[in-house]
Amino acid sequence: MNIIIYCQHVLGVGHFFRTLEVAKAMKSHRVTLVTGGSRMDIRLPSHIRRVELPGLMMDASFSGIYPANGRAAVEEVKKERRQILLDLVQTLEPDLLFIELYPFGRKAFRFELEPVLEYISQAGEPPCKVVCSIRDILVEKEDQHLHEMRAVNALNRWFDSVLVHADPRLIKLSETFSRMAQIKIPIQYTGFVTPLPDPDMVRHYRKQTGLSEKGKLIVASIGGGNVGKELLTGVIRAYRMLPVKDDRLLWVFTGPYMDDADKKEIHGLSGPDIRVDTFCDDFVSLLSAADLSVSMAGYNTCMNIVAAGVPALAWPFDHNREQRERVRKLIPFIPITRLDTRDLDPAVLSPVIGTQLEQKKPLFGNRLNISGAQQAVKMIERLCNDH
């Protein structure tokens, strides 16, 4: 099949990497991955071609979109993006348009998506199927009623299916979207999307730390890095309050989008047993090599934690319910502990970390379905083949 994937990340990198994992699983097909946030330099498999729209992003309060390069006017960027996307669909004549999140989110990008969707709906035979791809938990909106009505209308008018990247044993879409009965197209659960640890890379990372077999590795991360600096500073200062031991390492990741001044401050806190980096190409394998993860509670990080089988401390992003709810749901399934903002006080956090490190790393099987990328491909193949 000829597939176009549209993915617009606006703050962090979770949407991008989850969608990329699904795209990687489409290795039997020709994939054009259309992205539109701040640039991420990622090596892609040969079956994926990337088209980067002029970048648009949002600030942490989601108050509005702005050009990622800071130079062009927003309306000029929007006009250019709209034409590029429409031309791409008209030229490639895809069998499938795979849209991440919209219309359950990304309302600010209707300006470029609706013209494409309308064009597809009127293009005649052979039809291009349109699929919406969403994560487990939707964020609440200021006018939830209007938002849900708009989403239902768009789904029923332009889309053929909704793929929910979750395991319904953990959470169902109906828990964060009330108008399920009004959606007339199929809604399917793929399972969670995450890469799996590579045993060779797990051994590589463990060797890279220089730790013994009984040494303790803590990995602290905040996803893209736009938010969460206070978590990293709290973890570093709490780690320094632990009783001194030679066979221990704290490995900190700032994320690619952290402000340069904040990044410099975090790097200034590094030391012989505190390593600071920006990004890790195979984060799930690194987590599998670790004894403890300290992070926020975004979808990708949490599913990496599940796949890696690593105990975790998680501080949810407090702007909306999504991360808080994910941690709450995960607690019965994996050894994950929620941190509140008051827990970031080094004097409070240090004994929590110390207690975790003193315990033997638990063994727990994957009681959740984490084959979401592979299942998503099977579902879209059935959708297109049935036609």
Image: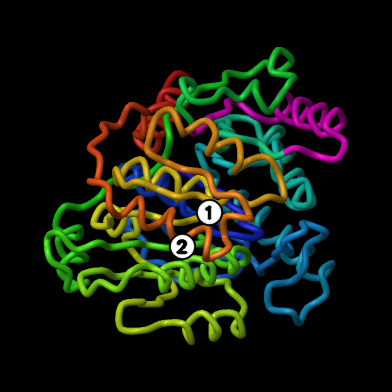
- Residue 76 spot, x, y in % from top left: 81, 70
Q: Tell me whether circle 2 and circle 1 mark residues in contact (CB < 8 Å).
A: yes
Q: CA distance from mark 2 to mark 1?
A: 7 Å
- Residue 5 spot, x, y in % from top left: 53, 47
Q: Does 336 appear above or below 319?
A: above
**Which residue type does callout 1 highlight?**
Met
Q: Which range of residues does the magenta coloring cover? A: 140-165
Q: Is residue 133 visible?
A: no
Q: Which mark is residue 296?
A: 1
**Which residue type does callout 2 highlight?**
Ser
Query: Please, which colouring scheme is shown?
Result: rainbow
Q: Secondary structure at mark 1?
A: loop
Q: Residue at x 28, y 46 (%)?
A: 196
Give the residue number, with chain letter if any, for mark 2: 221
- Residue 120's quadrant in the figure? top right
Residue 156 in magenta stretch? yes
Q: Secondary structure at mark 2?
A: strand
Q: Where does the N terminus fall, quadrant-wise?
A: top left
Please name whichever residue, 276 or 161, is drawn nearer the observer in this view of the structure.
276
Tell me which numbered mark, 2 or 1, is placed earlier along the sequence: 2
